[in-house]
Amino acid sequence: MANPVFGANIKLLRTRRGRSQEETAIALEVKRSSYSGYENGTAEPSFELLVRMSEYFKVSTDKLLRDDLTALSESQLGVLERGGDIDLSGRRLRVLATTVDKDDRENVELVPEKAKAGYALGYADPEYISILPTFQMPFLARDRKYRTFQISGDSMPPVAEGSWVTGEYMQNWQTIRDGQPYIVVTKDDGIVFKVVYSQVKEKGTLLLCSTNPLYTPYEVQIANVLEIWKFVHFISAELPEPNLSRDELARSVVDLRKEVGQLRLAMEQQGRLTF
């Protein structure tokens, strides 16, 4: 039985190129009627022809056969057609460059402010990662991978500018929990620390929000994302701003208790006088 996703995919890629079925069939060295059958889902190409189609459309055979390319955004299709790879599911196996100490334990690499600009280029380069400062945090789980990033800006209070935020490496982006903070590494914006909402299935994007209401939420294409790290903790030289409403409430409770105590004492004294 023919694969309907495959037929829709090659039709989409053909029409985006502005080619007719006849022109595409000639380029692939097949009959027009045969090619029409592939698009309509009434026929299946041979393995050799499938490889030629992959080379012709510059899309991997796996994506041609499995992924619904009609669901991609215009920008995602552009990346795909330029030879870029897009992870639609968020489950793709990712190879992470990392370092270990003399006892073969995973280090926590430190990405200071001055190294952030180059991280989006060198994140997958073992040589680049090897020159980053490293340390150990004995209270972190030994079976997970962590990295610490220095954060700039005031978009994520109570995390102040210059704080060090540690994240746990996310292998499967499908496990992102909406409304939770993550460190997101993107091709265009570099390293950002935001509250994340996944829109991968619906729009192929992540919605990034700040805890500072002055900053407007914005979307990033999943094809633009390089790494995601789940927030674990942060280290800062600044104390967080006090929660004034909570402090005021506590003071009100104390004052109320004093008033109740004074009233009770007055009533007891009044009762003794009456007696």
Image (spheres, rainbow, N blue to C red):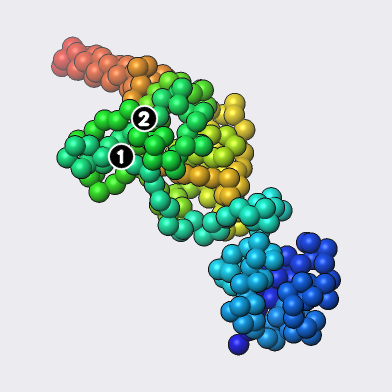
Position of the C terminus by quadrant:
top left
Rendered location of residue 38, percent (x, y): 70, 80
Relative to the observer, which residue lies in front, 178 or 268?
Answer: 178
Rendered location of residue 164, percent (x, y): 37, 26
> Taking 45 as reference, is 254 left or right?
left
Numbered badge on residue 132: 2
Residue type highlighted by circle 2: Leu
Q: Secondary structure at mark 2?
A: loop
Disc 2 versus disc 1: distance between alpha carbons? 9 Å
Name the residue rendered at 57%, 55% in the picture: 86
Indicate whether 150 appears above or below 203.
above
Indicate whether 192 appears above or below 42.
above
The quarter holding residue 215 reads top right
Name the residue rendered at 65%, 65% in the picture: 55
Indicate whether 25 appears above or below 72.
below
Rendered location of residue 105, percent (x, y): 22, 41
Mark 2 vs 1, N-terminal side: 1
Numbered badge on residue 212: none
> Taking 48 as reference, is 162 left or right?
left
Check disc 1 and report the residue beneath it. Answer: 99
Tell me, yes or no, whether the two marked residues, 2 and 1, touch with CB atoms within 8 Å: yes
Name the residue rendered at 16%, 15% in the picture: 272
